[in-house]
Image (cartoon, rainbow, N blue to C red):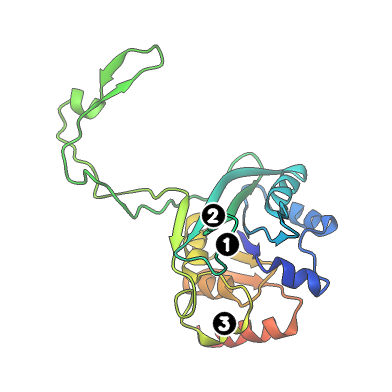
Amino acid sequence: MTGTGSRAQKRRFKRGINHGEVKRWRKMERIEAGGVVVWVVNDATIKGSETGTSFRQALRFKEIGFLLHDTMVYLKDSCPYPETTRYYPPFEYMFLLVKGKRIGTVHLIADKPNKTGGDRITGTERKADGTVKYMSAVEKNTGRKVKPFGVRTNVWHYGMGFMKSTTDRIAYKHTAIFPEKLAHDHIISWSNPGDVVLDPFMGSGAVAKMARLAGRDYIGFEILPEYCAIAKERLKYT
């Protein structure tokens, strides 16, 4: 599994680092069939226009052979920079990309409380020919009940900000961290214990830390020495 993101877009462009550079993405073709890439990305607004970076990068992955398995959303509980001419933007995209014909590992998280949890299953379903029939559990009078929790949607909500994204104070020396829980939830969803999790833009080391805590191995790359130091410090106590 590969999990990473390109969130501090303007800051990194100023330092000569372009995550959208075409040649770099060709290296991702070496991922094995069934392998998953989780790409968390947000657009900057420059000279009055959103950059569209998120869409271009998703389409670029498709061009080099990946399936766009799901377009997920990371929903924040606040907006760091309230707008005066736009509705507040509290989300980022999380593109789930797959190499090959199908995804290799899936462990969907079922933590969404069902409104009718514990109630007996009732209802009907419409068949392809337009006719309506009772659901099989009703027809067979099995007495089955609705489970207390169901699979969550592809919109994931997390708290963000100081001591919400992580309790590791050193992590906040990085300019654009995302919540540890976000990394954790993707890792347990798309990999198995003992698998290797790669973060090619390691940043503050959140993915590596959560991979280790989830019983996975990890590999991380980071070009900026100051960010490498942050990641090493966090992993030292994990």
Q: How far apart are the alpha carbons under marks 3 and 1?
A: 27 Å
Residue at 57%, 70% (x, y): give it. 207
Which residue is at the front of the view, 3 or 51? 51
The residue type indicated by label 3 comes to Ala
Which residue is at the front of the view, 14 or 108? 14
Q: In what element is the residue under mark 1?
A: loop
Q: How far apart are the alpha carbons under marks 2 and 1?
A: 7 Å
Q: Position of residue 66 (x, y in %)?
A: 69, 45
User: Is label 2 in contact with label 3 (beta carbons under 8 Å)?
Assistant: no
User: Is label 2 in contact with label 1 (beta carbons under 8 Å)?
Assistant: yes
Q: Nearer the N terminus, badge 3 or badge 1?
A: 1
Comparing labels 3 and 1, the label whose residue is closer to the camera: 1
Residue underneath mark 3? 171
Assess disc 2: are there few (<14), some (14-19) or many (≥20) residues with their C-alpha within 10 Å of its C-alpha: few
Note whether 114 is above or below 21 in the view shown.
above
Q: What label sits on residue 140 in the rendered view?
A: none
Q: What label sits on residue 87 in the rendered view?
A: 2
The residue type indicated by label 2 comes to Tyr
Residue at 16%, 41% (x, y): give it. 119
Q: Is residue 63 left or right of residue 218?
A: right
Q: How far apart are the alpha carbons under marks 2 and 3?
A: 29 Å
Residue at 49%, 74% (x, y): give it. 165
Note whether 143 is above or below 183 in the view shown.
above
Residue underneath mark 1? 83
Q: Position of residue 150 (x, y in %)?
A: 32, 47
Q: Position of residue 58 (x, y in %)?
A: 69, 48
Q: In what element is the residue under mark 2?
A: loop
Quarter-of-image position of residue 100: top right
User: Is label 3 in contact with label 1 (beta carbons under 8 Å)?
Assistant: no
Q: Quadrant of the N terminus?
A: bottom right
Q: Is residue 75 left or right of residue 29?
A: left
Q: Is residue 223 left or right of residue 104?
A: right
